[in-house]
Amino acid sequence: MLPASSADALAHSQRVTAHLRSLIEDAGGWMPFSRFMEAALYAPGLGYYAAGAAKFGAAGDFVTAPELTPLFGRTLAQAIAPVLAQTGGEVLELGAGSGRLAADMLGELARLGALPARYSILEVSADLRARQQETIARKWPELAGRVQWLDALPGRFRGVILGNEVLDALPVELVHWTEAGPLARGVILEGQSFAWQDRPIADPVLRARAEALNLAPGYLSEINLAADALIASLAQSFDHGLMLMIDYGFGAAEYYHPQRHMGTLRVHYRHHALDDPFHLPGLADLTAHVDFSAVARAGMGAGLELAGYASQANFLLNNGLTELLLQTSPADAAAYLPQANAMQRLVSPAEMGELFKVIGLTKGSVAPLAGFARGDRRHSL
């Protein structure tokens, strides 16, 4: 049974629902799912990521790797420190969540003597931005002055661009392959409820992508044009360095496998995974797995080089996760065991270790990355 929502939360969801209904009406009665997802997640003051409810951790809807243990951020700091040294650049984190990852990375970079002059965070949510500022100031007040928040991508950038669970939260196009060819799945109003309706694909780029996949009639899945656009925009401002994206997903062959014929779109609500994307708009997270083949293609098409693609487990272990854990003595069970258990969740194939992947894209001269030294699967993309 799902946890009950408070009266205030339900009232908020009703406001979000009313906003979505008005958008559909203004669009003539049909709206592509990508527009529905974008509004449900990001509408100012209303969307899931734009309003004030807790998202992360035990009190929220899901747990991300930085919430599990500081070892995740510390290991990523180990991974990027050589690139910062090579480029003399900075860090740009996209969508920094609660700020835990930034705080943990800053602390480890300081310990390594590898602090960048600036650590920038691009955050669209005013609520999350305030939470990030509080988290970083509380943990590292002496480092908080190095952090700046951006409203838009910088014009020019060198260093490391980092996105942890960013691509999965971008609005996706839903496509239904039929005997008559691929159709765009959109949202209509049916009484007081939302319902699905398929229409011919108007966008020539989406239509070409869908036709190229050539999937069997009855197949339903996602195409993430927004991820392609984000990677291309980042590449345009990128002078020299590494772009590192961490998320759950697959290469195209596995993403569009015949057995995955209902797609990957999911709803996360209070630590429950649901299939109904119309469940309590504004209170639930909408997400889709990442097609890493498309990410690699978008990056290389924008002038980046594919530096590697690996499971999260391989990437973290290659960058010294185990060694960082052992800095806490196993004899101190109270300190060691929670971190060991968290590490197990990060690397276990049954948890996050295999489902989550890491892709690296570079521009300019960047030395081979330790994270891809063993277990690099770029050939599978």
Image (tube, rainbow, N blue to C red):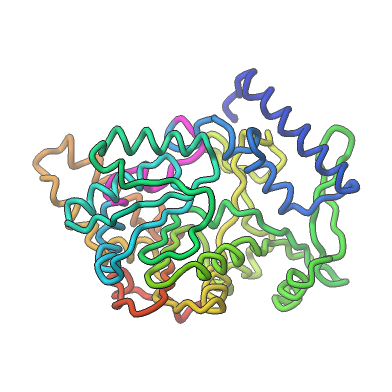
Q: Is residue 65 left or right of residue 272?
A: left
| Count of numbered labels shown in the rendering | 0
Instruction: Determine whether 64 is above or below 324 in the image.
Output: above
User: Given the current orientation, which residue lies at the most extreme top position?
Assistant: 7
Question: Which quarter of the figure is the N terminus placed in?
Answer: top right
Residue 116: x and y, percent? Answer: 28, 57
Is residue 63 depicted above or below 365 in this figure? above
Q: Residue at x 28, y 63 (%)?
A: 79
Given the current orientation, which residue lies at the most extreme front position? 155
Q: Where is 332 relative to 380, above or below?
A: above
Q: Does the magenta stretch include residue 96?
A: no
Image coordinates of residue 210 in percent, x first then y, are: 73, 72
In the image, residue 17 above or below residue 236? above
Left of 355 or right of it: where is 125?
right
Where does the image place residue 280, in percent across and percent down from the top left?
Answer: 68, 33
199 and 131: which is toward the camera: 131
Q: Is residue 162 left or right of residue 178?
A: left
Magenta stretch contains residue 70: yes
Question: In this image, 19 relative to 170: left or right?
Answer: right
Instruction: Give whichever of 107, 17 is nearer the camera.
Output: 107
- Residue at left 88%, top 71%? 180
Q: Determine which quarter of the picture holds residue 22.
A: top right
Residue at 41% over, 58% down = 162
Q: Name which quarter of the figure residue 205 lies in.
A: bottom right
Which residues are drawn in magenta? 59-73
- Tell me residue 221's x, y (percent): 69, 62
Q: Residue, x 31% and y 51% (percent of image)?
A: 73
